[in-house]
C-alpha cells in the first residue's frame, strides 16, 4: 500500500452561518488521482481549498506529509503552495503582461531560482504539455486549451507532490478538456504526483482512479469502503453483480430500452 | 421489467388482492410497460408457489371473491437481495433503475434509506464503468474508431449518471409521491 500523503480529519468550515463542510474526513495516497465530486454547494471546492492550505478550516485537521498544515501561518502555507503543493483553477490565471514561459517559470523565480535555469525548466514543462512552441507568446494570444495547458505546466513546474485542480476543464470544450486531462493524468503518473480534481462532471471524474463524492458538506462515498453511505446508519449489503467489461461497442441492441414517452 | 419484485414491493406496503395490485402498479409506474391482469395473477401464483407470498384471506366487496395476498419473510428477504444489487452499468438502464428506486422507497420509507443507498451504489458502478472506457480511449496506440466507440458509451453512461444525480436531488419529492 502506498503511503498517505495528505489527510483531512473531521473538517468543518462555514461561510457566515452557512456550513460548507460538516465533518469531512478523507485521505489521499502518494501519486493517486482522486476526483472530488458533488452538486453545486456540496462543499467540494471548500474541501479542496482547505486541503491545499488556502482556506483555514473552522475545525478539524489537515496533515500533509506527516505535518499539520492547517495551523501554519499564512506565510508558511503560501511557501508550501509554491513548492510542494500546486494549485490550478478553472481559469488558469496567467499574468497577461508576461510571456508564457515567464508565467510558467514564476513559481521557481519566486522561490529564488536563477532566471535562466527557471526558464529552461519552464520550457521543459511546456514541452511535456505540447505547447513549447508558445513559450514566447503572451497569454492573450493563446486559445483556452493552450492557456490551460500552460497553467497546468505552471502548477507542476515546482514538481509538487500534490496538485489541486478546481474544475480544470470548466472553461474548455470537450475535446480540449479531454486533451488536458489525458496529458495531466499521464504526467502525474510519470512523476508520482497526487492529483485532486474538483468536478461536477462524471466524464472528468472518470479520469481519476477514485471518487470522493460529497453531498451537503459530507462524504457519501469515498471509493474505499465497500459501499457508499446514504447517511442512514444501517449496515449495507450492496454488491455489484457484474464485472465491468471495458469493451466499447455501438451495438446496444441487447440493452434494456428506456421509453420515457410511452405509457 | 422485474414483475415479481415489483409486485413484492407493492405487497410490502400491505396485503392486497390482484386487482388492487394492478391498479397500484399503474399509479406507481405510469410510464412503464402496462402490466396485464393475467400477468399479475400468474406472477402471484408463482410467488405463492415459491413461498415469497402467501394467500392471506378472501375479500368480497359487491363483486366476486378476491384472494388477498401478503408478502412472506422469505419474500422480504428476496426483495432486499434484489434491491442490494446494482444494475449492470450498461447504457439505457434508466427504466430498470427507476423501478428499483420506487421499489426501494416502498420497502424502506426512511428519508435517507435504501433508495438513496441504492442510487449511490449504482452511481459508483456507472462511474467505474466510465473509468474503464476512459482508460480504453486514452491508452497508447488506440485507434480513432475505438476512441469514438468509447466516446459513445461514455456519453450514454454519463446521461444515465446525470439521471441518477437528479433522482438523488428529487428523492424526497418522489418519496412523498410514492408514499402518498
Image (cartoon, rainbow, N blue to C red):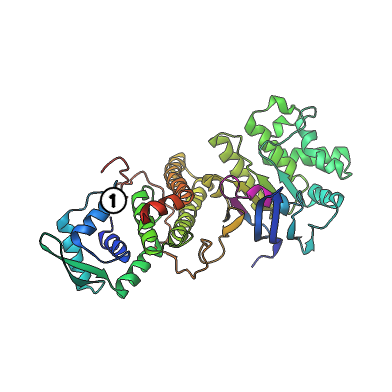
Question: Which image quarter is the C terminus of chain A in?
Answer: top left
Closest to the observer, A102 or B117: B117
Residue A162 appears in the figure: no
Q: Residue at x 84, y 50 (%)?
A: A74
Q: Residue at x 31, y 52 (%)?
A: B28
Above/below status of A83 relative to B63: above
Q: Is residue B166 left or right of residue A127?
A: left
Q: Is residue B133 left or right of residue B104?
A: right
Q: Is residue A239 left or right of residue A84?
A: left
- Residue A118: within the magenta? no
Pinpoint residue B175: horizontal percent, then vertical percent. 41, 54
Closest to the observer, A70 or B73: B73
Q: Secondary structure at mark 1?
A: helix
Q: Among all residues in the image, which is located at the extreme left? A: B64
Question: Crowdedness of circle 1 by 10 Å Cα count: few (<14), some, many (20+)?
Answer: few
Q: Is residue B53 left or right of residue A30?
A: left
Q: How many marks?
A: 1
Q: Residue at x 38, y 48 (%)?
A: B91
Q: Among all residues in the image, which is located at the extreme front? A: B62
Quadrant in the picture for residue A66: bottom right
Quadrant in the picture for residue B43: bottom left
Give the chain of mark 1. B
The magenta segment is A34-47
Pinpoint residue B4: horizontal percent, then vertical percent. 26, 63
Pinpoint residue B74: horizontal percent, then vertical percent. 30, 74
Residue A178 appears in the figure: yes
Q: Among all residues in the image, which is located at the extreme top? A: A141
Q: Residue at x 71, y 38 (%)?
A: A151
Pinpoint residue B14: horizontal percent, then vertical percent. 30, 65
Q: Which residue is mark 1?
A: B27
Above/below status of B49 relative to B180: below
Question: Which image quarter is the N terminus of chain A in?
Answer: bottom right
Amino acid at each position: 500500500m502506498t503511503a498517505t500523503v495528505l489527510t483531512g480529519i473531521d473538517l468543518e468550515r462555514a461561510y457566515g452561518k452557512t456550513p460548507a463542510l460538516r465533518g469531512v474526513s478523507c485521505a489521499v495516497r502518494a501519486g493517486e488521482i482522486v476526483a472530488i465530486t458533488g452538486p453545486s454547494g456540496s462543499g467540494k471546492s471548500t474541501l479542496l481549498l482547505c486541503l491545499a492550505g488556502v482556506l483555514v478550516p473552522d475545525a478539524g485537521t489537515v496533515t500533509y506529509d506527516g505535518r499539520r498544515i492547517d495551523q501554519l501561518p499564512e506565510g508558511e502555507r503560501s511557501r508550501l503552495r509554491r513548492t510542494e503543493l500546486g494549485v490550478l483553477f478553472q481559469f488558469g490565471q496567467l499574468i497577461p503582461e508576461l510571456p508564457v514561459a515567464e508565467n510558467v517559470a514564476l513559481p521557481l523565480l519566486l522561490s529564488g531560482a536563477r532566471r535562466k535555469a527557471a526558464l529552461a525548466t519552464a520550457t521543459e514543462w511546456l514541452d511535456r504539455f505540447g505547447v513549447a512552441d508558445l513559450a514566447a507568446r503572451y497569454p492573450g494570444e493563446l486559445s483556452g486549451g493552450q492557456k490551460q495547458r500552460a497553467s497546468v505546466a505552471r502548477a507542476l513546474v515546482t514538481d509538487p507532490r500534490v496538485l489541486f485542480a478546481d474544475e480544470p476543464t470548466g472553461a474548455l470544450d470537450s475535446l480540449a478538456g479531454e486533451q488536458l486531462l489525458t496529458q495531466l493524468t499521464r504526467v502525474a503518473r510519470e512523476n508520482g504526483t497526487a492529483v485532486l480534481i474538483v468536478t461536477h462532471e462524471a466524464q472528468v471524474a472518470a479520469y481519476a482512479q477514485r471518487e470522493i463524492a460529497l453531498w451537503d458538506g459530507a462524504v457519501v462515498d469515498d471509493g474505499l469502503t465497500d459501499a457508499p453511505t446514504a447517511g442512514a446508519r444501517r449496515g449495507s449489503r450492496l454488491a455489484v453483480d457484474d464485472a465491468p467489461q471495458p469493451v466499447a461497442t455501438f451495438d446496444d441492441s441487447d440493452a434494456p430500452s428506456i421509453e420515457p414517452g410511452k405509457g | 421489467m422485474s414483475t415479481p419484485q415489483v409486485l413484492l414491493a407493492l405487497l410490502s406496503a400491505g396485503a392486497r388482492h390482484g386487482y388492487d395490485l394492478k391498479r397500484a402498479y399503474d399509479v406507481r409506474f405510469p410510464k412503464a410497460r402496462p402490466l396485464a391482469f393475467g400477468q399479475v395473477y400468474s406472477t402471484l401464483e408463482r410467488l405463492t408457489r415459491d413461498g415469497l407470498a402467501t394467500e392471506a384471506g378472501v375479500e368480497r366487496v359487491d363483486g366476486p371473491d378476491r384472494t388477498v395476498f401478503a408478502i412472506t419473510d422469505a419474500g422480504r428477504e428476496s426483495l432486499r437481495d434484489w434491491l442490494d444489487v446494482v444494475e449492470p452499468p450498461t447504457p439505457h438502464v434508466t427504466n430498470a433503475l427507476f423501478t428499483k428506486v420506487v421499489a426501494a422507497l416502498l420497502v424502506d420509507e426512511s428519508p435517507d434509506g435504501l433508495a438513496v443507498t441504492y442510487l449511490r451504489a449504482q452511481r459508483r458502478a456507472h462511474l467505474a464503468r466510465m473509468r474503464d472506457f476512459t482508460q480504453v480511449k486514452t491508452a497508447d496506440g488506440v485507434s480513432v474508431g475505438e476512441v469514438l466507440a468509447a466516446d459513445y458509451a461514455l456519453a450514454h453512461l454519463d446521461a444515465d449518471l446525470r439521471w441518477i444525480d437528479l433522482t438523488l436531488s428529487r428523492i424526497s419529492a418522489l418519496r412523498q409521491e410514492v408514499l402518498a
